[in-house]
Amino acid sequence: MDNSATGDCGNFRKIWEVMILKILVIGSGAREHAICWALSKNPKVTRLYAAPGNAGIAEFAQCNPIAPLNFEELIAFAKNVGIDLTICPMETPLVAGIVDAFEAANLRIFGPNKSASRIEGSKIFAKDFMRKYGIPTAHYQTHTTFESAMVHAATATFPLVIKADGLAAGKGVFICPGIESAHETLDTMFNKGAFGAAGRKVVIEEFMTGVECSVLCFCDGENIVPMESARDHKPVFDNDYGPNTGGMGVISPNPAYTDEMAQITMEKILLPTMRGFKHEKIDFVGVLFVGLMLTKDGPKVVEYNCRPGDPETQALLPRLDTDFLEIIEACLDKNLDNIEIKWKNNAVCCVVAASKGYPGDFKTGFEIRGLRDYGSFVQIFLAGTKKDKNSFFTDGGRVLNVVASGATLEDARNEAYKALSGINFTGMHYRTDIGEIKN
Ligand code: AMP
Ligand code: GLY
């Protein structure tokens, strides 16, 4: 074999190339489907497993009905099957310490440990961290009683943002236009216990205006490398009406995130965040999601998440030109500064099709028609779905994502909506304005 191209790495490469890799992905959403799709492109990955997975993931991976918080069973499964690497993109297991549990069992896993995941698990921790390290964010105060929170609200400028401290599945943030709604929100959190312990500590913060931008970053504990930018669309209806959801669609890149914004973000937010982690002896290895508000005073942090965003991941992975597994391995080996991460110079539009009624009550069990190959520019990632014989059925609030790429955002939007017009199920709802930039 001629190793001239690989030099001294020849032997290492040879071992790596024949290695049989078994990978377990934790989760059951369209994000996990996109991750399995990206991993399946690497010829070294011989077997993919998911827990619990979904009907789309089942096309790539063996799905196992193990709950993401059942660490004992997940570890036993990983050991029995001989899993080489587990990937956990879900916040609940990360915040509960899945990485610590796997590592204690000598299993390789990609994601931040329990200490590092506090950056999403506690909004108070995240805000205090930002204050300590001078990272731009909204002014805030924290409260642990209804009375002190109300005293603050009584003299505050509205609108005011009230956030439950702990994880609340994206439902713990309230933008209150006046004192009545602040009273109602605080009463629901403190006195009615709507979010349990997660809502008995709150952050009250200043309302920021501007364009939102999601910046997901690969981190190896030493280095932070941002991915391309994205823009989520959280409210359920067009023109940002209706309640917030887990995300109704996303575009990448985000047109408002100019090179100048990216440079300021790197200097004022991403590098100080990494320095802060190191100073606090937090070893953040995984994907750090930085939610930004691009204000007239520059980018400010709205929130950190300890995992890749959903649906941002579904739009970003199709744009990635470097092998995803190679980047994950570089993060785990603290070697991120030695690889080049390349992106396609295109645009992607991802539109979510949801069940009627989502994010409130909805019915499931409707047949999904039109799931077929829509050409190489379109990927369909499934979320809440079930397969029975050869048919797919709805089984959740967010049902599927249509992700289309194009030379321009307009091309990508057109492709996405063209494909979507061929898909239907009873009660299918989607926003018609994903990527229609109005501000
Ligand atoms: P979070 O879960 O913290 O990202 O908040 C959910 C959404 O609430 C964000 O995507 C924003 O649209 C909005 N939001 C949160 N905090 C603020 C803030 N301080 N000012 C304006 N909007 C906010
Ligand atoms: N798309 C926002 C999130 O994943 O939290």
Image (cartoon, rainbow, N blue to C red):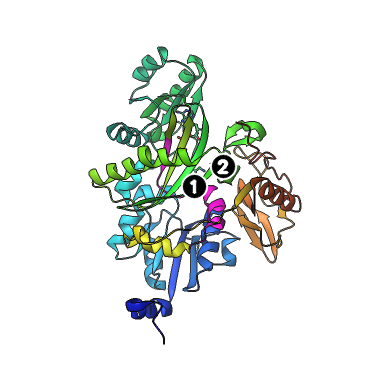
Between 37 and 151, the one lying in front of the other is 37
Outermost residue toward the bottom?
Answer: 1
Pointer 2: what residue? Answer: 247
Pointer 1: what residue? Answer: 309
Which of marks 2 and 1 precedes in the sequence?
Answer: 2
Q: Is mark 2 within 8 Å of ligand 2?
A: yes
Residue located 55% across and 46% down the image:
253
Which mark, residue 130?
none
Whether 108 is drawn above or below 348: the answer is: below
Residue 234 colored in magenta in the image: no
State the image quarter where residue 298 is shown.
top left
Amino acid type indicated by mark 2: Gly
Residue 314 colored in magenta in the image: yes
Q: Which residues are magenta?
A: 302-322
Whether 32 is drawn above or below 249: the answer is: below
On the image, the x and y values in percent for residue 50 come to 49, 63
Whether 55 is drawn above or below 125: the answer is: below
